[in-house]
Structure formats: C-alpha cells, structure tokens
Image (spheres, helix red, strand yellow):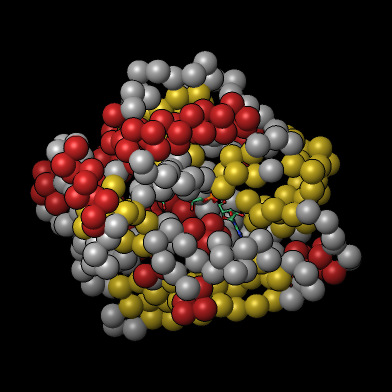
Amino acid sequence: MIKVHDKYPLLKHNTFGIEATAERFVEFSSAEALVGFLKEGFSGKSLVIGGGSNLLFAGDFAGTIFHSRIMGIEVLGESENDVLVRVGSGVNWDEFVGYCVEQGWHGLENLSLIPGEVGASAVQNVGAYGVEAGDLIVKVEAIEIDGASPCVFTNADCEYAYRHSIFKGAEKEKYIITHVTFRLKKHAGFKLSYGNLKEKVDELGGATLANVRKAVCEIRSAKLPDPAEIGSAGSFFMNPVVAAAVAARLKEEYPAMPQYPLACGDVKLSAGWMIEQCGWKDTPHEHVGVYRHQALVVINRGGAKGGDVIAFAAAVVASVKEKFGVELNMEVNVIE
Ligand SMILES: Cc1cc2nc3c(=O)[nH]c(=O)nc-3n(C[C@H](O)[C@H](O)[C@H](O)COP(=O)(O)OP(=O)(O)OC[C@H]3O[C@@H](n4cnc5c(N)ncnc54)[C@H](O)[C@@H]3O)c2cc1C
C-alpha cells in the first residue's frame, strides 16, 4: 500500500522536534508498492527517512520524503549455532532488539535503546558498547530510486566502517532500503568490556541476554536525553581523530584531556570534553544548548528552528577550533 500526503508536517518525524514541512510525504508498506509508485514516473528531489533521529531539517523540504512502513520479522533459516532473520525496514530498531533478546538470539543486545528504524541501521552502521550493526548484517535489500529496480547488497558491498556505509558514501541517496537480513547467534558471546557495562551487568546478577539489555538501557537512560522529552539527534558531532604528535601537544597543555589511541597510530579525542571545556554547558543560546549530562548532545531547549541549531553548532565548532585547534565535524545529517 502507498499513502501520499501533500504539505506534510515533519514535527513527529524528527527527534530534534523541529517544525518543518515536506512538499510530499510517501509511505509504503511493501517493496512492490514502492516499485509501482516509482514506475509511475517519479522524479525530483527526494529523501528517505526512518525515525528521523539522525536528521536536522534546516527548513522546509521542497521535495518528496519516503518513509518505510514495511514491517515483519521473518526467520529465513537456522542451524544449531545461528539464525538468519529478515526484517522490514520500517520496524522500530529497539523493538527488534527486544524481540531478539526474548527469542534468545545473541548479537544486538548492546545496541538496545538506540532510536530509529531497521532500514537506517544498515545505512548508519549504528554502534554502541563495542558492537556495530554491520557486524551482524548479511544482506540489504533496496530499491534504486532512478529506474525503480530491486537490488541486493551483501555485507561486503555495504563497505561498513565506523558509523559509515556505502549508503552514506558512493551510493548516498540513491536507494530505498526495504529489508535487512541479520545473522544472530544462539549461544552466548557477550561483549562487556566497554565502559562500565560489565560492572552494571554484574550488579544485575550476571551476564544473560536480558541483563545485558537492561544494563545498556539503564546506562543510556542516565546519560542521554529521552527523545520523547528533550529534542536531540544524539551525538551531534563526531569524535575527532588527530595525529599522535598533535595529541601529545594537546596532552601537555591539557593533562586531563581524554585520549583514545587507535590501532593506526592516530588518536581519537573526546568532542564532548572539549565542548564542555569551552563552557557550553553553562552558556546555552535561547532555543539551543548542550545536554547537561553529555555535552556532545545538542538539544532543542524549545521552539528551535533548524537555523538556530546550525548557528549554535557553528559557534561550538569555532570555539573548539580556537581553544584546541581541532576541527569538529557533524555526525547529524543536515537536510537542506
Ligand atoms: C538520543 C539518541 C541517541 C542515539 N544513540 C546512538 C548510538 O548510540 N549509536 C548510534 O549509532 N546512533 C545513535 N543515535 C543516532 C540514530 O539513532 C541512528 O543514526 C539511527 O540509526 C537513525 O535511525 P532513523 O530511523 O531515525 O534514521 P533517520 O534519522 O531518519 O535517517 C538517518 C539516515 O538514514 C537514511 N535512511 C533512513 N531510512 C532509510 C531507508 N529505509 N532506506 C535508505 N536510507 C534510509 C536517511 O536518509 C539518513 O541519511 C542516537 C540518536 C538519538 C536521538
């Protein structure tokens, strides 16, 4: 089924809580219906959205927004060790993770409570607590917008890297994802080494799927704003990576600066720490600020427009550049 809405309000379709309008908003509940719609001669500017949790609308969208309503979780096959599961791109990500935990399928539990939908997980390569969705994705089914042709991408085709995939790179905005297939394990193989996850799991009585999910949800809820209450798109900036010599110079000047050496020799810095050192926790703008528990998260303090957020972000970037000489890049997709 296809539903087409004209002049459609986007407030409920972005977790930043920005009021904007799409010229046209198209919802589809099957790949076949989407192909039929595209074959009727679709052209013009387009955007695909899921839950809108990694988007910032700069203003109204003068084009067509596609949103998947393809639901369903289907077991394609299983062995003694693993299970192959095909999921509709419109399924809520956390509901899918919760379902896997209930079924006793291992692999996604560390990715509990990440907002958004299954289709976007394959674009964004969502990650948390040492696990990335791309580690478990076997296949991505999509429709090419130009030509309305169905395509299948293997895991290797997707070119997964940190918060990155081919759908954010060479094939950006060319495909609408309809289904994602995951291979999940039937036996325990918990990853608890990240942050205080193990400590929290132990407090809950030890490593079980349910306890890991509960621990992740509790840690996240204490650190990140609930999109239902405070508008944000999660981490607004990426943690910058600098050469070892730059990191060493910064450490000399700022001994408390957190630094994470990478295997390649470069060093990852904490964007949140630098933003906090620039004083942004205490100096919000009228409609925009940073979250009190995590300065990496830019929040809508009420009534913010896309332009207010962009201006605030530019001021944050300039202050970090001035104080530390480090360039911050946005993780959020700004939609013009
Ligand atoms: C409070 C909070 C916490 C967060 N924590 C994390 C975290 O821990 N780890 C993490 O990785 N991310 C995190 N995020 C970011 C966000 O949740 C993820 O990027 C998520 O995958 C976005 O899903 P979405 O459905 O909302 O996608 P959207 O924001 O709607 O879209 C994101 C991108 O995917 C594309 N897209 C969406 N659906 C499709 C589709 N069906 N076909 C083709 N392209 C599509 C869009 O065009 C866009 O480029 C957080 C966000 C918030 C608000």
Residue that appears at 27% across and 68% down: 264
Furthest-top residue in this view: 286
Whether residue 18 is visible to the viewer of this picture, yes or no, is no
Furthest-right residue in this view: 40
Tell me the quadrant of the picture where the C terminus can be found.
Answer: top right
Tell me the quadrant of the picture where the N terminus can be found.
Answer: bottom right
Q: Position of residue 293 (x, y in %)?
A: 30, 29
Q: How many marks?
A: 0
Furthest-bottom residue in this view: 79
Residue that appears at 85% across and 69% down: 39
Residue that appears at 44% across and 19% down: 284
Q: Position of residue 19 (x, y in %)?
A: 66, 29
Q: Considering depth in this image, is 316 or 168 the residue closer to the camera?
A: 316
Q: Position of residue 257 (x, y in %)?
A: 20, 40
Q: Is residue 272 left or right of residue 313?
A: left
Find residue 235 and report its image quarter: top left
Q: Is residue 152 left or right of residue 73?
A: right
State whether residue 257 is above or below residue 205: above
State whether residue 15 is above or below residue 63: above
Q: Position of residue 38 (x, y in %)?
A: 81, 65
Whether residue 53 is visible to the viewer of this picture, yes or no, is yes
Q: Considering depth in this image, is 205 or 135 the residue closer to the camera?
A: 135
Q: Considering depth in this image, is 184 or 72 the residue closer to the camera?
A: 184
Q: Is residue 62 left or right of residue 268?
A: right
Residue that appears at 81% across and 37% down: 7
